[in-house]
Image (spheres, rainbow, N blue to C red):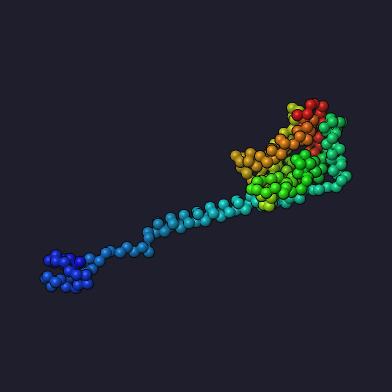
Amino acid sequence: MIPCQQCGADNMLGAIFCRSCGGKLDLDGIRPKTVNQGHRPAFARTAGAIWSLVVIVLLLAAVGLLVGLFLPPSQGFQPAAGDDAAKAQAEQQAAGVRLGNRGPFGFDSVQLTLLANAAFNLDKGPSSAGGFVLRPEKIAVDILASGYLRLTLKSTVAGQLPMYGTVVGTLEAANGGVTFRPVAVRLGRITLPDSLRDLGLQRFAILAKDSKELQEVRGRVAALDVREGRLWVTPGHGTAR
């Protein structure tokens, strides 16, 4: 019904004149007011644009982080296989360290890589086990020109997706044992902040703890030195730890 603004009588919808007083009905006054949804204040439009930009930047950063975690390290990953002679020499020198023979013994990157894969039981090839589990497969040890050691561990998720962890640091012999002091830890190509270093070191620590050969050698080392592209190990005569 449409009320007449002059006499108050009700009129049928669609009527133009009042059936009671004959006055013209004010149809504009009774139409519902519409709001122009297309018009927004300038500050609202600016805030919306800024928020959209922030969301896009965060999404790109998340994608970049995820991709960076699964990219191979920038230096590549090529653990040197060496030959039978290099492996035999490395094993002979490692035996000399365990026995406390007169040293020092010098190990290059190839020899350290061979010994590390054997000590961590990673020289038998990739694991065929399935499941969404991160499994270590190969490790590469490099002696850098700066005197640091770089350890790169390749693991796979579900036996298919490769993931790389890299640790750069120094080896120090003290109090009848060997300590590795990291200066940089990376997952893929992402350098972890100090607060997350333990996360990147966890896989290496598990391997080291489970290796009986490594534990035996650690207790026999009296001094360590990196020079001429080799890690020089001087055996001691203490009890293996």
User: Is residue 57 shown left or right of residue 212?
Assistant: left
Quadrant of the rendered image containing residue 14: bottom left
The image shows residue 192 at horizontal and vertical percentages of 63, 44
The image shows residue 49 at horizontal and vertical percentages of 46, 58
Between 216 and 174, the one lying in front of the other is 216
The image shows residue 64 at horizontal and vertical percentages of 60, 53
Residue at the image point whose x is 73% and y is 43% from the top: 151
Q: Is residue 158 above or below residue 6?
A: above
User: Is residue 192 shown left or right of residue 172?
Assistant: left
Residue at the image point whose x is 63% and y is 51% from the top: 68
Quadrant of the rendered image containing residue 149: top right
User: Is residue 65 shown left or right of residue 230?
Assistant: left
In the rendered image, the quadrant that contains the C terminus is top right
Between 124 and 86, the one lying in front of the other is 124
Residue at the image point whose x is 65% and y is 42% from the top: 200
The image shows residue 236 at horizontal and vertical percentages of 81, 28
Q: How many marks?
A: 0
In the rendered image, the quadrant that contains the N terminus is bottom left
Q: Is residue 218 above or below residue 156?
A: above
Residue at the image point whose x is 88% and y is 45% from the top: 85
Whether residue 71 is visible: yes
Between 41 and 199, the one lying in front of the other is 199
